[in-house]
Image (cartoon, grey):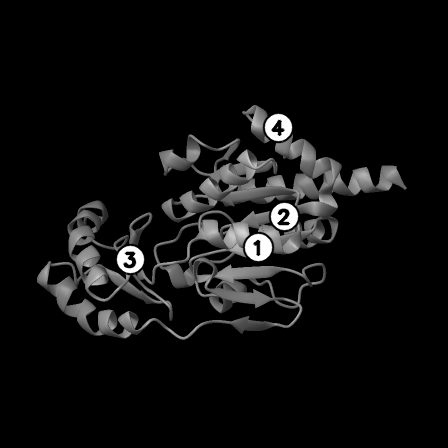
């Protein structure tokens, strides 16, 4: 991607202009899986696109902050992303578990609350629920510390398994004070009260951002999109990027639609080059 694509909406064009004119006050926030990393059958094998870390390390010193906002545990996202100890990413922040956890590159430590008591109860009951609905074989349970995620991607009929499990897992979550968060062939049981929108809005306020870019790909990113829309209504420009077209609710709202993590990485590379050129011209 040699040039930045033009956003398809007036609000998106205004936001890109704001980022380019005052990058030192811009927040660049990105989801991890499906946005910086390709979706893979085994979530433990997910890794950031090879160009993502170099692109972020080139971009981060030019903007107010770069944040990864993910449903994964913060420490796992750091490992799978390869974000630790990278020159240029000294001030990177990873907001894990939808913002409930936080890793700062400056300290290299994760701050996290105690697990919700419902997680232990769900962990004990989950095998029986899966077995009762004929979904034990082919599903995979991801331990996330603050949450549990049931993946159906490896089932014989992934979509059928996903739909069959939605209601019983929602009931299981509700019995123990949790919520069910659906995604692309994944059903996550997690505590209520925090989502990517809350995390993004709070962090934007914390860093004093006067413009925001957010990139995501899945249903869990809808609250972040809503937060950007709210910031826009309050007069703070926001640019929405969508990675892929699997979730129409995101794609329809996006200012820039990109096919996947490779193109998101190329966008970040182009943005970093453009900002670097603008800085050189202003000297």
Q: Please report whichever mark, 2 or 4, sits nearer to the chain's N-terminal start.
A: 4
Number of numbered discs overlaid on the protein picture: 4
Q: Which residue is mark 3?
A: 179
Residue 13 is labelled as 4
At x 44%, y 38%, the residue is 244
Task: Give residue 160's position: percent from left, percent from top.
Answer: 17, 46
When the figure is inspected, residue 87 is found, relative to residue 269, above or below; the finding is below
Q: Please report whichever mark, 2 or 3, sits nearer to the chain's N-terminal start.
A: 2
Residue 203 is labelled as 1
Element marked by disc 2: strand
Task: Give residue 260's position: percent from left, percent from top.
Answer: 48, 41
Q: Which residue is mark 2?
A: 27
**Which of the two discs, 3 and 4, sits closer to the camera?**
3
Element marked by disc 4: helix
At x 21%, y 74%, the residue is 124
Element marked by disc 3: strand
Quarter-wise, where is residue 78 in the image? bottom right
Task: Look at the image and tell me whether residue 65 can be seen.
Answer: yes
């Amino acid at each position: 991607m040699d040039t930045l694509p033009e956003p398809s909406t007036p609000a998106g064009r205004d936001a890109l202009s704001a980022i380019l004119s005052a990058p030192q006050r811009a927040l660049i926030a990105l989801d991890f899986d499906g946005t910086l990393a390709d979706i893979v059958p085994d979530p433990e094998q997910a890794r950031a696109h090879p160009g993502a870390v170099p692109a972020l390390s080139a971009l981060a010193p030019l903007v107010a902050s770069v944040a990864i906002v993910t449903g994964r545990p913060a420490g796992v996202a750091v490992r799978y992303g390869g974000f630790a100890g990278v020159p240029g990413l000294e001030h990177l922040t990873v907001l894990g578990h939808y913002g409930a956890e936080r890793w700062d590159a400056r300290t290299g430590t994760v701050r996290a609350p105690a697990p919700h008591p419902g997680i232990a109860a769900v962990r004990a009951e989950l095998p029986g629920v899966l077995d009762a609905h004929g979904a034990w074989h082919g599903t995979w349970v991801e331990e996330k510390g603050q949450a549990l995620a049931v993946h159906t991607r490896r089932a014989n009929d992934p979509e059928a398994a996903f739909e069959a499990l939605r209601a019983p897992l929602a009931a299981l979550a509700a019995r123990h004070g949790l919520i069910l968060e659906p995604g692309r062939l994944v059903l996550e049981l997690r505590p209520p009260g925090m989502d990517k929108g809350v995390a993004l809005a709070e962090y934007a306020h914390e860093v004093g951002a006067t413009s925001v870019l957010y990139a995501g790909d899945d249903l869990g990113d809808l609250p972040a999109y809503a937060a950007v829309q709210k910031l826009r209504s309050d007069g703070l420009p926001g640019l929405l990027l969508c990675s892929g077209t699997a979730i129409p609710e995101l794609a329809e709202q996006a200012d820039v639609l990109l096919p996947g993590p490779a193109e998101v990485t190329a966008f970040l590379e182009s943005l970093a080059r453009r900002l670097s050129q603008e800085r050189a011209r202003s000297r």
